[in-house]
Amino acid sequence: MPGFMENVSTLNSFVRTVLAVVVLGGVGGGSWYAYYKYNAKEFEAQDKAAKLAEANQKLEDAQADIASKVKLIQEKDTRISTLNKDIEKLRTRMALLKVDHRLARLTVTNQEQRGEKGDLWTMLDFVELNDEGVPYTTDPARSFEIKGDLVYIDSWVVKFDDKYIEERDLDRGTSLCIFNRIYGERQQPIEGFPLDRRNTRPTGYARGGQETEFERKIWDDFWAIANDPAKAKEMGIRAASGEAPNMRVQKGKSYRVTLRASGGLSITPEETPKVNEAPK
């Protein structure tokens, strides 16, 4: 019996403990529920504030990212614009270097064989032109008879450093040329016909008018300058030398003598004009 009563006492103690826990849990839960209900609006406000802060932070991050990308695009656009300008300048410089100035036209009026050996003679007209291909009114065509059909045009040519041509320097914006003589393959150069007309600006590269002081100095001291690299460099001259381009000509054809802004002389056949088309 005492053991039974002891077990009953232990059970009662356990039940009381469980009931106490339940009661305390209920009281605690009720208290928390009451506290939450009482402060629900504050909790919701805090939650909304946290979410709003998080959203604002994301927006700020996105705006910063966009601003960074916009700046990068602007920098690339600036670089592209600079590159395009550099390319355009380079194209302009290259175009200036390749400008061809019309100097003269050769027109073969006749070819015939003469003498016992049947030597070929070529009759031709030589006229200096402006850049539009129009003869100068003050410089009429001159007629020559050349032995053979291979025609040489002996000239002095001055070529300047490219930078002066690219910068369109007033005195050195293009190569300079002055004609000396014209002759055939079966003639000695010294036997050639003179073409030089000094004291007037060489017409091929000229803009008309008299020689400038700079040009006169070059022609007067041509060979001295050609043989003095230091003097030539001081004047911006890349090369000064004689040139004698030649062409085997044909009866009835015309040939254009041109001077490249950065180079030397060329002789090329002109295209045959079409019907009702003016000669070039």
Image (cartoon, rainbow, N blue to C red):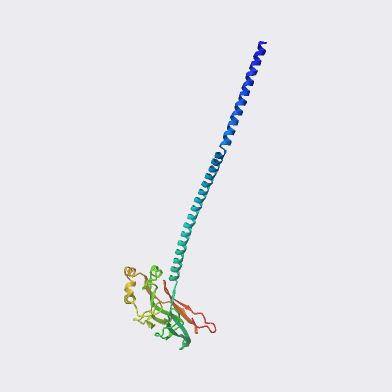
Q: Residue 164: x, y in percent?
A: 38, 69
- What residue is drawn where x is 54% and y is 45%? 52
- What residue is drawn where x is 64% and y is 16%? 9
- Quadrant of res 86: bottom left
Q: Residue 18: x, y in percent?
A: 63, 23
Q: Residue 203: x, y in percent?
A: 39, 80
Residue at the extreme top:
1
Query: Height in image: 183 above or below 51?
Result: below
- Where is the N terminus found, in terms of image quarters? top right
Say left or right for 193 vs 252.
left
Residue 16 visible at all: yes
Residue in front for this viewpoint, 233 or 53: 53
Residue in front for this viewpoint, 121 or 35: 35
Query: Height in image: 13 above or below 71?
Result: above
- What residue is drawn where x is 63% and y is 21%? 16
Residue in front for this viewpoint, 1 or 270: 1
Residue at the extreme bottom:
115
- The count of marks equals 0
Residue 249 visible at all: no
- Quadrant of res 150: bottom left
- Quadrant of res 51: top right
Q: Residue 144: x, y in percent?
A: 42, 86
Residue in front for this viewpoint, 93 or 55: 55
